[in-house]
Image: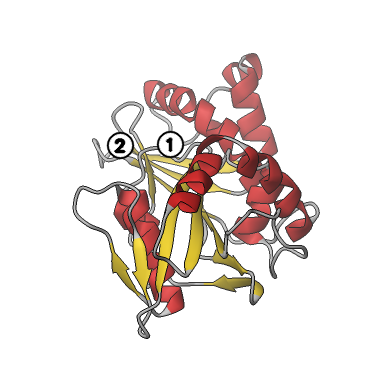
Amino acid sequence: MPREVAAAEVAARVLGASTEHPSGAHGTMSLIYPDGRRAALEEATLGEVEDLLLAHLLRESDVQWTAPACWWWQVVINDVRRLPRVREIFPVAARMCEAHDVPSPGHLPAALIAAVPDLHWLVHTGPAQLLGHPDSPGRPATVTLRPGPAAGRGMSSVVPSLRDSLAGGPAARALRALRQRSGATERQLYLTVGWTGLSPEAFDALVRAAGVPPVPPPEQDRLSHLWLAPVLGRTVFLWSRRDGWSRHEPYG
């Protein structure tokens, strides 16, 4: 349960609390404040997050994608909004490069690039840079983020995109579980946000934009804290009824 463990660890770091997560007991995470107050914590995952390891969720390693062929590949994301499509076509692009013994899609024959729409898009729009290393076989691909500003409307896109996510799916199930928790003075929902968990613009804003969302999240009965933890970048966002939105960088 790496996402649940990461949620408790990150929340505890930000709030100055300790964690309580009984071995083998799913959905019973709690935070204990120094004064003895207890916060119930539930984690839910929005969108695709691959099989992320605890080390990445705590930012002790890069995101890893399964190697599509033999080489080690580095993937540097330029446009966060295009990440889902990059993830989809990466295996095909990597295999074609290895078959032609070239280190990146831009080195493939021009006729092949023109004939394959996904390759043409990848090479000519530049949403990511792919670099293969034939001398390091068998390693998972590593995915990193090129620094840069957010596109679009910035933080104003986050809360509207969040509404649908809270209305159903994993987040709604976690909210129901929180309402049933007893003996806690706070109820906190921690959302691990994958690259398809919110709109492309909202995910891009969480990863790159400055500031915090300008409006509170949709009202949820008995919810005291809401966390947004995108799987890229180093920022975690926290909303509380008392303090509103804040941003934190809890990773070592």
Q: Is residue 4 above or below residue 122?
A: below
The C terminus - image quarter: bottom left
Could you tell whether 135 is left or right of 227 in the image?
A: left
Q: Residue at x 64, y 70 (%)?
A: 241
| Three-letter code for the amino acid on which mark 1 is drawn | Pro
Q: Residue at x 38, y 27 (%)?
A: 101
Q: Is residue 86 above or below residue 96?
A: below
Q: Tag count in the figure? A: 2
The image quarter in which residue 166 lies: top right
Whether the residues at callouts 1 and 2 have beta carbons within 8 Å, the answer is yes
Residue 185, position in %: x, y?
A: 47, 70
Residue 156, position in %: x, y?
A: 78, 57
Q: Earlier in the sequence, mark 1 or mark 2?
A: 1
Residue tagged 2: 134
Q: Kindly state the secondary structure of the residue where label 1 is placed.
A: loop
Could you tell whether 68 is left or right of 122 in the image?
A: left
Q: Residue at x 59, y 31 (%)?
A: 85
Could you tell whether 248 is left or right of 8 in the image?
A: right
Give the class, few, some or many, for how many residues have Cα within 10 Å of label 1's Cα (few <14, many ≥20). some
**Nearer to us in this view, 5 or 236:** 5
Disc 1 from disc 2: Cα separation? 8 Å
Residue tagged 1: 103
Q: Kindly state the secondary structure of the residue where label 2 is placed.
A: loop
Residue 46 visible in the snapshot: no
Q: Residue at x 39, y 64 (%)?
A: 183
Of all residues shown, which one is farthest toward the bottom? 35
Residue 22 visible in the snapshot: yes
Q: Is residue 198 above or below residue 232?
A: above
Residue 182, position in %: x, y?
A: 41, 59
| Three-letter code for the amino acid on which mark 2 is drawn | Pro
